[in-house]
Image (cartoon, coloured by chain):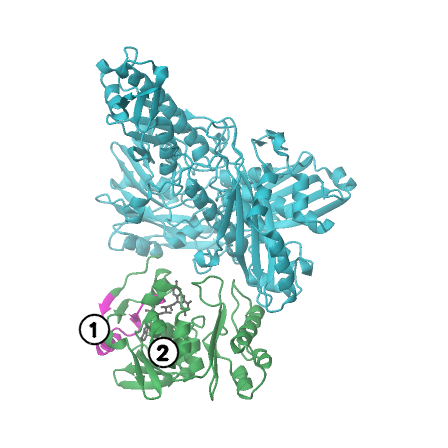
Amino acid sequence: MIPAKFDYKPASSAEEAILLLQEYGDEAKVIAGGHSLLPLMKLRLANPEVIIDIGEIQDLSFIEERDDHIAVGALTRHRLVEHSDLLRENVPLLAHAASHVGDPQVRNRGTIGGSLCHGDPASDLPAVVLATRATLIIRSQTGEREVAADDFFTDFWETAVNPAELLMEIRFPKVGDQPWAFQKFSRRAQDWAIVGCAVQHGSNPGIGMINMGSIPVRSSVAEEALRSGNAVIDVASVADEGLSPPSDIHAEVDYRRHLARVLLGRALS
Amino acid sequence: MSLVGARVIRKEDPNLITGRGQFVDDVQLAGTAHMAFVRSIEAHATIKSIDSTAALECDGVIGVWTAQDLNLAALPGVPGLQRPPLAMGKVRFVGEAVAVVVAEDRYVAADAAELVFVDYEPLPVVTNINDALQPEASLLFEEVGSNTVFEMPTPDDFQSVFDDAPHTSSVHIVNNRCAPAPMETHACLADHGPSGLTLWASFQAPHHLRNTVSGWLGIAQDQCRVITPDVGGGFGAKVNWTPDLFVAPILSKLLGRPVKYTQTRSECMTQMYHGRAQEQDVDIAYDADGQILALRVLVYQDCGGYPDPTGMGLPALTTTMAAGCYVIPNVSVAWKNIVTNTTPVAAYRGAGRPEASYLIERAIDLIAYDLEIDPLVVRRKNFIPPESFPYATHSEIAVYDSGNFAGALDELLNIMDNDAIRAEQQENLADPAKPLLGVGFASWLEIAGFGPPGSLEGFGHLGSWESVQIRIQPDGSAIVYTGASPHGQGTVTTFAQIAADYLGIDFDKISVRHGDTATIPQGIGTLGSRSVAVGGEGVKTASVRIADRAKRIAAHLLEANPDDIEVANGNFSVKGTPAQNVSWGEVAWASFRPLEIPEDMEPGSLDNTVLQQVPNFSFPSGAYACVVEIDKETGDTRVRDMYLVDDCGTVISPMLAEGQVHGGVAQGIAQALYEEVRYDENGQPTTATFMDYLIPAAPELPNFTSGRTNTPTPNNTLGAKGIGESGSVGAPPAVINAVVDGLHHLGVTHVDMPANPQKIWRILQGGVT
Ligand SMILES: Cc1cc2nc3c(=O)[nH]c(=O)nc-3n(C[C@H](O)[C@H](O)[C@H](O)COP(=O)(O)OP(=O)(O)OC[C@H]3O[C@@H](n4cnc5c(N)ncnc54)[C@H](O)[C@@H]3O)c2cc1C
């Protein structure tokens, strides 16, 4: 539980962080809340030579109402997301899901940006980003680009954020009074989901699945069934269709598929 | 007012909750160097070569040593099968120490350990009992010729009783391997200078460590001081001879500076010896009324990569206690000790007894299912009646001291509403929206208070007594020194309660000190739920002796007859004339002044040392019930309620007794539903982090409803039995009996631990039962 040797570079602005990223290239890693990166470093599964700390960049922590969406800064801690009235009113699924991340210590340190950039299919918030069809804003030295949730998660623990880029904010469309639901199946209160799902109803309903693939995925088949007005039981029964859930010591593939169908059924009822 | 039985606040807490506790890693000695181990990444392999060149080039590295470099003797253990402190030519489990690095700080040491290149030639791996027993299995110890390193056959298998019995049932039980995982990992700090060795260790038995390490190093015991400061939990796993305890003193002497080692959590999961890891074949014969005729148990003990003497002894305890609370005329027991390419196995809270209570309490429910009668009826039919104590069992080791098993079950049914739960169970069965309910019972019994002469010597201890020394200070306060070595039990509080009662000194003027071989006369340690039943009795013995002498001094000062002196509220007075009195402080002061004490007394006589012995073990017992909820769709199984009736005889501190039960029950629920150490087919641990090794926390645990019966033990004058391991003995069978009860409408009669949701879901799907 002792990380390999690394250099520590605090950044006081996004610009400085990006400059540092450019300077150190592949050897560098940004650290936000550290709650995904540090465990990997302590287990020596990640051995970055330089750590660029963006944890103190206040400008990246915000929750703002802008026209048809709510913008959430990448460095906003889970705890602020969980307790934000603005989000509870306009993107309640996000606020609710944030309250299910780990335990209070984790939520006080972990950030939404870190959670998304880590790209873990077992994490809660990627499913919300998929279900709500959020847009992610990524900055590099040459400027900012927008990436749709569907294009963000690219491979196991890999995202569209390139080595010299920073995730700046996430834009969640306001959902008004549209219903939503979140289901998380875990053994212990503080655990990651064995399987979970996030559902956002609306004109284009979204169903984000947790731990049902090697990357965070949506259940397109179930979404289509929902759009076509199928009964709950029929939508739920295709929750896992087209998906390739992992197998591990906590759940094998067939059990994960079953859980996906049960949980989606509960989310839709 | 008697302090024994009072709900006093723990004396330990102010230090611990204000962060002023001192654990081994908090001890900072000038010039300390830090030790890290190079650990095997293979489960079974020969070592072709070890290359330390790169590690030695690191800035801050002081040295790297292998077994060859240090030429070390094997660790104390089973003759012929001893573990080398550093692997000798071959590794037998993932994590085994292969080389040791010492550096200026912990970080450099960890980095350098990564740079030591070990060339392994992998050997076929055996990770479980079944594989180990195959005829072609790869052998851990070629010289033994088998992976079964010891076998205790049964003198009589009672086959004719089974052949003639009207009914029999059989079950193969897996008692899952658990990791002790105390809050504080293991740590040690060795300072081996010209005047001897001081060794700080996170350990449960400082004198035992002192005696063993000094013998191994070949230094006199007077030159070896072991200190166990605050210890953050041990659960039986901090009495094992792990390499660091022996290598650190050697390297400290070699380098002329203190050497420290603090286990990381990852290391703790593979280095701290595991517990349980048994499989059992259980057969039981009975008549049509459920009267038991015979029990036959064959235990397969997985000992891991190196058989530890305690680990090999676990089946002895399991088979000794196999008949539980019941009259069983024919009991046949046998066991095998088997080695596998896994972490060694030794004592873990309960050590052999949870495995016993689990098998017999499962067998009782099998009888009930087979005969379709109430499991409580089967229990009552076979209970040893309260008037038959002392009760000689099939085992020479166990003569049950006292018990009232039916009384505990009555009390259990008082504190729960079994009928209402049964009614709800039927309702839920019919309602698809509601979870399945299951109710399980366990009438359990265990062997504690180790113990009578001979009980610990076999495990390498000096004796089975416990030491207590009480020294009255000149101001009338008292210091109790003891060889008991608490690591979370609250012994400082309970021993002060006992001393307060029998000395007549205020509880706040009594300190209890432990964990230092330089100040404590001799000692055995805290294990086997023995502190109160043995050491606590010693506190009473010494207190009574001192109080008698103090009364003589008081009588002398008051010019009265010693027989007329009473002591209360810190004062000695003459019976009937309370105004004629002298305080404890005055008596204590006088005891050091030759002119103020009776002529036939010596100054300083208010000081007494006892090596307290007890004639027999104590046998705590109880009745537990568990209610589980099982999600019909997901198989998710949660404990909804737990009803706990404990009988540990006299309770010294109700709060601490409850705390012990709650903690033990939490670990029992953990074993039944959550925890299991697992390996993949290559012997790689797959549960070596707290992400994968599922220790439940408060949200996963129910509220506990407690009751109590009180059947004192005749083996000490306090009447107190051990309570430290009860919960972990009683809870697993109660929980699994509840799970099976909840699934019995599907024909299920057994589910192996841990009953995780996937397993239950497969059963609900009509799969394995
Ligand atoms: C005990 C525990 C329990 C947990 N339980 C859960 C759970 O139940 N559900 C769940 O979803 N998560 C859980 N987590 C993870 C938690 O949500 C983490 O906080 C989160 O995944 C990572 O956020 P972070 O800010 O800590 O990121 P960090 O660890 O700092 O970074 C994670 C990764 O993202 C990169 N990164 C971070 N910010 C940016 C950025 N702005 N731009 C580009 N790259 C960036 C880093 O370089 C790193 O690769 C748990 C964590 C712990 C320790």
Q: Is residue A26 magenta?
A: yes
Disc 1 and disc 2 on one polypeptide chain: yes
Q: Pointer 1: what residue?
A: A12
Residue stretch rendered in magenta on the structure: A8-36
Residue B289, position as x, y percentages in the image: 74, 43
Q: Pointer 2: what residue?
A: A87
Residue B460, position as x, y percentages in the image: 46, 32
Image quadrant of ligand 1? Answer: bottom left
- In this rendering, the answer to whether A196 lies above or below B103 is below
Given the image, on which type of amino acid does mark 2 rest?
Leu
- Name the quadrant of the N terminus of chain A: bottom left
Residue A263, position as x, y percentages in the image: 53, 73
Disc on the earlier residue, 1 or 2: 1
Q: How many marks?
A: 2
- In this rendering, the answer to whether B402 lies above or below A14 is above
- Name the quadrant of the C terminus of chain A: bottom right
- In this rendering, the answer to whether B152 lies above or below A111 is above
Tell me the element at label 1.
loop
Asked whether residue A157 appears in the rendered view, the answer is no
Q: Which chain carries label 1?
A: A
Residue at figure coordinates x 54%, y 53% from the top left: B672
Q: Cβ of disc 1 within 8 Å of ligand 1? A: no
Residue B394, position as x, y percentages in the image: 64, 33
Residue at figure coordinates x 37%, y 80% from the top left: A89
Question: Would residue B361 be found to the left or right of residue A207 on screen?
Answer: right
- Asked if disc 1 and disc 2 are in contact, CB closer than 8 Å, the reply is no
Chain B, colour shown: cyan
Question: Would residue B67 be found to the left or right of residue B449 on screen?
Answer: left
Q: Mark 2 lies on which chain?
A: A
